[in-house]
Amino acid sequence: MVEATTTITGFHAHIYYDPETRDVAARVREGLGAFEVRLGRWHDRPIGPHPQAMYQIAFLPDQFVKVVPWLMLHREGLDVLVHPETGYDVLDHTNHALWLGNKLELNIEILRQISRA
C-alpha cells in the first residue's frame, strides 16, 4: 500500500489525437509552449500504455495551477490525461489520474510489467 505522504515530483499531461485532429493537437501544443513545460515528442501511433497517438508534456508541481486550468479551457475537444509523478506508475496512471474529456482505456499491464522489471 502506498502511504498518503507520497511526494509528487512533477506531472505529465498526455494529449491524445488521431490523424483528423493532429492539427488541433498542434494548436494546443503551441499554446502550451507559453508555459514552463517540457514538450515531448509526437507519437503518431499507440505507445506504452497509451491506446492512441499522443504527445506528453511534463511540468513541475508549481505549474499545475497554470497548466491544468488552461488545458481545461483550451484542449479543443481533445482527450487529456493528467497524472502525477510519484514513482508508482500504475497508481499514477489509474487512481491518481485526472481526465479531461473522455477517459481512455490504458494498457496498465504494460506499466505493471515495467514496475516488476
Image: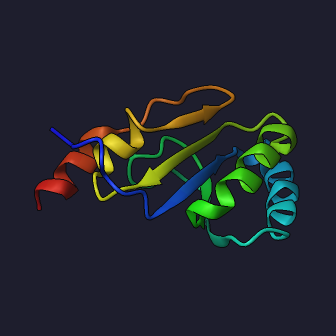
Name the foreground residue: 27 vs 74. Answer: 74
Q: Where is residue 94 in the image (x, y as percent from the top left)?
A: 38, 35
Q: Farthest residue to the left: give it.
A: 116
Tally of numbered tags: 0
Please say if 32 is above or below 95.
below
**Residue 57 appearing in the image:** no
Residue drawn at the location 18% of the way across and 55% of the way down: 115
Please say if 6 is above or below 43.
above
Q: Where is residue 114 in the image (x, y as percent from the top left)?
A: 21, 57
Name the foreground residue: 81 vs 7. Answer: 7
Q: Farthest residue to the top: give it.
A: 102
- Quadrant housing the C terminus: bottom left
Residue drawn at the location 40% of the way across and 42% of the way down: 93
Please say if 117 is above or below 70.
below
47 relative position to 101: left or right: left
83 relative position to 21: left or right: left
Name the foreground residue: 61 vs 75. Answer: 61
Q: Where is residue 70 in the image (x, y as percent from the top left)?
A: 82, 48
Q: Position of residue 2 (x, y in %)?
A: 21, 42
- Quadrant housing the N terminus: top left
71 relative position to 27: left or right: left
Q: Farthest residue to the front: give it.
A: 5
Quarter residue 95 falls in:
top left
Please say if 105 is above or below 17.
above
**Residue 32 appearing in the image:** yes
- What's the colour scheme? rainbow
Residue drawn at the location 44% of the way across and 64% of the way down: 9
1 relative position to 51: left or right: left
